[in-house]
Image (spheres, grey):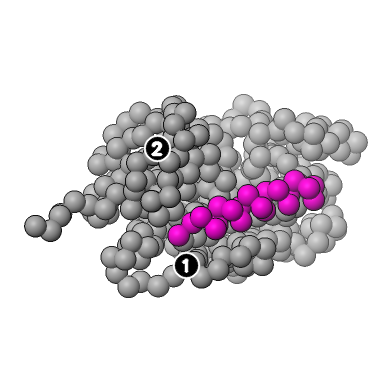
Amino acid sequence: MQSTALPRLLIDVYKTRNLNSGIGRFSVNFAETISKNSNTGYAIDFLCPRNFPAGDWGHVHLQKVNFQKRYLPWFNKTYDIWHSLYQFPSHIPNRCSKWILTIHDLNFMMEKDKWRSTRYLSTLQDNVNKAAAISVISDYTRAQVLEHLDVKDKPLYRIYNGISVNTFPDAGQPPFLTNDKFFFTIGIITAKKNFHVLVPLLQKFPGYDLVIAGENDSAYAKGILALVDELKLTGRVHFPGKISEKNKYWLYSHCRAFLFPSLAEGFGMPVIEAMLLGKPVFTSTFASLPEIGDKYAFYWQNFDPDHMAEVLKEGLSASDRQKEEFSTAMVGYAQKFNWSTCIDNYLTMYRQVTGLNGVTP
């Protein structure tokens, strides 16, 4: 008699332990969306951290991490698919499970020194060698993978991230900000985010404040604070650190524009978050940002304050002249990056990898 048991799928959502990171937010949204889909065709387990949020996870079974799962992978259960949502997972499958590896970026190549980046690249190549298939989150990341890694003949899928913004109609202005005219940006404040270039730019916009939200305990963040003091902008540049979802929603909704001069992004989630709330986005031409922003963002070709100010002034003027038309088109574009489509694409990938249909990468 033919078995009717569903194929078994494990999804490693361990990175949800840090919801202030892009990988953490990606992982929890992935988990929430796929758990609500009752017709995946798979018996699904989540490999999750001990602080994984309690709640109704539908048909999904939770596998909490432990010593065995991390350090003795040959004792782990065998799955038809083991999907790691991060390229450097802390937990790996046994050799009988088909491993899918999602690669978000190769940012370590610019963030680390040569010795460390070589080690990271070697570890990632080892993971790629063990994987049955690979997914990436942008065409830019795909190009980086093909340039720096040997994927051999493994299937390589590009699946864009789903993006959503939690809405809070009752959200009020955060107490650290009293000026109604402000620019906003968000991210872990490290050198790759390039936030320091926004400080001299602010000098060109008297009457405006700047909010730089995100984890700010780095030496780079301290350097920005010193630059703020040097340029006598104290009181106009705000570093609230990690902010609540409610405050994030209010800041996105009420800022004059969203500024994102990053140098290295595998995707660039804040770009789409800002667009979903109808805000003009100004960003760099580096990495994946022109791909994700497309024609709906304004781009700085360099970081000279005069050039940046000119682009910002012209972009604000253009978006104001065609406000309704511009906002409608931008929001419609951003809505294409939704979680339902994202998960459908991953389910298609699972079926192809397990041989359940003939879909190609």
Please state which amino acid type lies under the numbered disc 2. Answer: Phe
Q: Earlier in the sequence, mark 1 or mark 2?
A: 2
Q: Position of residue 294 (x, y in %)?
A: 59, 67
Most foreground residue, 141 or 33: 141
Secondary structure under tag 1 reads loop
Q: Quadrant of residue 32?
A: top left
Q: Which residue is mark 2?
A: 75
Residue drawn at (84%, 47%) of the image: 200
Visible residue check, residue 171: no
Residue drawn at (59%, 53%) of the image: 126
Most foreground residue, 337 or 125: 125
The majority secondary structure of the magenta stretch comes to helix
Q: Which residue is mark 1?
A: 155
Residue density around tag 2, few if under 14, some if 14–19, many if 20 or more, within 10 Å: few
Residue density around tag 1, few if under 14, some if 14–19, many if 20 or more, within 10 Å: some
Q: Is residue 112 left or right of residue 150?
A: right
Residue drawn at (44%, 45%) of the image: 93
Please state which amino acid type lies under the numbered disc 1. Answer: Pro
Q: In which quadrant is the N terminus drawn?
A: bottom left
Q: Position of residue 56 (x, y in %)?
A: 29, 34
Estimate the spatial distance between the alpha carbons at disc 1 and disc 2, rounded to whole Å.
27 Å
Q: Position of residue 174 (x, y in %)?
A: 59, 30
